[in-house]
Amino acid sequence: GFIDPNWQPHADFKNDTQGIWLHNFIWAGINPGGMIASYWYENSHIYSQKPDGTYSFDFRDRYRAYYNFIQDIPSGYSIE
């Protein structure tokens, strides 16, 4: 999972300096039915801001490519 038994970010996240895990997590939503998952650890997995305001890492831009791809695709579903 995303956290270790002590409720801390799993060590694999710290080793992924390119945000590949987030890219895969985001794009997994394209499969039939999509992947729906709540995500609670944005400040330790997706971006990390230092006390001086700079970022140790910031992967939030990974969402833009997905948004640009998916924004004009009709869902094919209607809620009635």
Image (cartoon, rainbow, N blue to C red):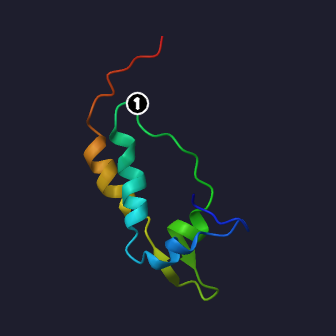
- Return the residue nearer the eye: 3 or 76: 3
User: As rendered, which of 52 and 27 lies closer to the eye?
Assistant: 27
The reply, left or right, for residue 15 in relation to residue 74 is right
Q: How many marks?
A: 1
Asked if residue 59 is positioned above or below residue 40 in the image, the reply reads below
The x and y percentages for residue 56 are: 51, 83
How many neighbours does mark 1 have within 10 angstroms: few (below 14), some (14-19), or many (20 or more)?
few
Q: Name the residue nearer the viewer: 47 or 23.
A: 23
Q: Residue furthest right?
A: 6
Residue found 26% across the figure and 37% down from its top: 72
Identify the image quadrant of the N terminus: bottom right
Query: Does 42 sit above or below residue 74?
Result: below
Query: In the picture shown, does residue 10 fall above or below 80?
Result: below
Give the percent coordinates (x, y) of residue 33. Answer: 40, 30
Kindly give the residue lying farthest to the top in the view shown. 80
Residue furthest to the bottom in view is 52
Seen at 58% across and 83% down, the residue is 53
Residue 43 position in % (x across, y down)? 60, 68
Q: Which residue corresponds to the image point at 61% horizontal and 62% vertical from the top-left?
A: 41
Tell me what residue is drawn at x 50 percent, y 72 percent: 12
Can you tell which quarter of the image residue 19 is in?
bottom left
Q: Secondary structure at mark 1?
A: loop
Which amino acid does the dot numbered 1 rest on? Gly
Which residue bears the numbered disc 1?
A: 33
The image position of residue 18, as x and y in percent, is 37, 74
